[in-house]
Structures are given as C-alpha cells and as structure tokens.
Image: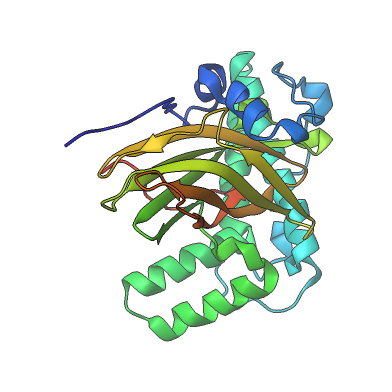
C-alpha cells in the first residue's frame, strides 16, 4: 500500500503547541482573505478578563442541572446561549492565565467555577442527559433532550467532526478550539481543523479548488473560495491519502463550516472536474465526544 501524506500537523488538543507547529501559516494560505482579524499570542492579563460571577446565568436553569426538562426561560434562548458560551471561554482562558502566573489559589477558584458552570449550563447538561439516556436505552427521554437542545442551541447537536464520501473520495474533518490564539474578551475565537482526504477509488485525482461556507453563531455566513489547499494542488493516487491542517478565526464562540473540493481525474485527457462534499462540522468551544481521525 502506498501512502501520500503531506504537511501533517497534529496535537490540536494542546492548544499552545498546535499554534506553534504551523497552524498560523496554514491559516494564512487557507483563509488569506480573513487575515484582517487579529489574534495576539500574548496572554490576557487578569485585569482584561477577570470574571467575578462564574455562572449566574446557569443558575436560572431549572434547579442546578437536575431537572429533566428545559422550560422556556430567558437563560435558554439562542442569544443567551451565545453569552454563556463567551463566559465559559473567558473562564477557561482566565484559569490558564492564573496557572501560568502561578496564582494557584485563583486557578483553583476558577476551576471550581468551571465545574459548577458545566453542571448548570443548560446545553452541557442536556447533552449529558441525552448521552446517559441513550446509554440506558431510554430513547424517548433522549429524543426529548435532543428536541430541547435543538430549540435552545440549534448547532449544538452538530459534532466537531464530519465524514463524507463522493465518487470514492472520502473527506474527514476534525475541529478543535485553540485557547492560546483566542481572546474571548474581544470577541475573537480561533479554531483549528485537520482534514484527511482519501482516494478510495481506482483513478488518480487532483484537488484543484476549495470552497468553504463559514457560519457564525449569529447566522452570518461567509463564502471563501481559493485555489488548492494551503498553497498546493495535491495529486492523490488510488488508495493514498493527503492530510493537512488549517485554522479559522470566528467572532463568536460557536459556528459551523461546510463546503466542497473541486477535483479532476488526471488519467484521461479532457476529464471534467467534479465536486467532493465536505460535510458540515461544528466550530465550538464546548467540543464534543467525537473520535479523532486516527485509525
């Protein structure tokens, strides 16, 4: 078996390490038109992003996270979910800053606030309840939690990974939130994603162009077109794969991406190009339980 593997960047789960191992360069070439959004590498100071109340909005959600229902309250509409997500991102980053500055008492306080937030945050709670209901085969309850999630946070059911095959070309994606490149207090969030393109067909193909549709939590969409990926137009022989990593800045803590690659068979002169789907996947600071791309 032959393997074609170029520009592989791994370690996204370690945000600082991932950022230093090439994500920035990939982002510049993949989303050159989006470079107007700045992301500083320095840590935020405590003055800039200190939070006094960790999860006041979460306490409005039906009694500390044990309720089996999600009634319509001000804390459980989509705009409120966006606000809570921003608070969650700020807490996580503030804890990292406190730990790096060796303020362990503050780091422990924020850690406890995060635990309470995760227990009381409606979306996280409903996702946990849905997962438990599925594991216990209480499918009627699972359906109810799913519907409640769909109502208060429509994109929360979308995973941070996707997998789609078109004409024998398989595209797998996995996204992750990069805390070290984000500044929640300024409404700047940075997401990295890893893509594996596998040619499971019997014909060689070349990737010509890319098209992305990027949608933020407010429903604002942006189309991005470009030649190749990360400055290349790779050729994939049968039974080979190509992997690369890139990144996407976002003005909200949640969003989604989808799109397609334009490809062409190169074993026959005059072959027409065709489009390979990139199935929708989530950009989320909350993450999910998606598996990685390793086989």
- Report the residue at 75% width, 47% height from top: 252
Q: Decide if residue 64 is in sight here.
A: no
Q: Position of residue 214 (x, y in %)?
A: 69, 51
Q: Position of residue 142 (x, y in %)?
A: 45, 77
- Report the residue at 64% width, 13% height from top: 101
Residue at the outermost left position = 1
Give 161 or 180, whichever is nearer the viewer: 161
The quarter of the rendered structure image containing the N terminus is top left
Query: From the viewer's perspective, is residue 20 above or below residue 174?
Result: above
- Report the residue at 40% width, 27% height from top: 6
Query: From the viewer's perspective, is residue 207 above or below residue 5?
Result: below
Colour mapping used in the image: rainbow
Query: From the viewer's perspective, is residue 104 above or below residue 215?
Result: above
Give 15 or 256, whichever is nearer the viewer: 256
Give 212 or 218, whichever is nearer the viewer: 212
Q: Position of residue 13 (x, y in %)?
A: 46, 33
Q: Decide if residue 226 is in sight here.
A: yes
């Amino acid at each position: 078996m032959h393997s074609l593997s170029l520009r592989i960047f791994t370690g996204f789960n370690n945000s600082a390490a991932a950022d230093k191992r090439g994500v920035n360069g990939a982002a510049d070439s993949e989303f050159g038109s989006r470079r107007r959004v700045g992301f500083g590498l320095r840590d935020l100071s405590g003055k800039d992003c200190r939070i006094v109340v960790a999860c006041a909005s979460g306490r409005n959600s039906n009694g500390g996270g044990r309720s089996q229902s999600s009634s319509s309250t001000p804390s459980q509409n989509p705009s409120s979910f966006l606000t809570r997500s921003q608070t969650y991102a700020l807490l996580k980053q503030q804890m990292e800053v406190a730990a790096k500055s060796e303020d362990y008492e503050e780091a422990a306080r924020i850690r406890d606030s995060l635990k309470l937030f995760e227990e009381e945050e409606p979306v996280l709670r409903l996702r946990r309840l849905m997962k438990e209901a599925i594991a216990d085969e209480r499918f009627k309850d699972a359906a109810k939690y799913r519907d409640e999630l769909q109502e208060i946070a429509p994109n929360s059911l979308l995973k941070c990974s996707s997998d789609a095959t078109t004409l024998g070309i398989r595209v797998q994606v996995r996204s992750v939130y990069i805390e070290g490149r984000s500044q929640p207090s300024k409404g700047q969030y940075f997401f990295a994603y890893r893509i594996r393109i596998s040619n499971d067909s019997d014909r060689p193909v070349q990737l010509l162009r890319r098209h992305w549709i990027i949608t933020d939590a407010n429903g604002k969409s942006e189309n991005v077109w470009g030649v190749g990926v990360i400055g290349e137009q790779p050729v994939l022989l049968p039974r080979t794969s190509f992997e690369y990593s890139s990144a996407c800045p976002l003005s909200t803590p949640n969003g989604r991406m989808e799109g397609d690659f334009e490809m062409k068979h190169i074993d026959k002169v005059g072959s027409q190009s065709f489009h390979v789907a990139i199935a929708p996947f989530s950009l989320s600071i909350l993450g999910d339980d998606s598996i990685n791309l390793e086989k």
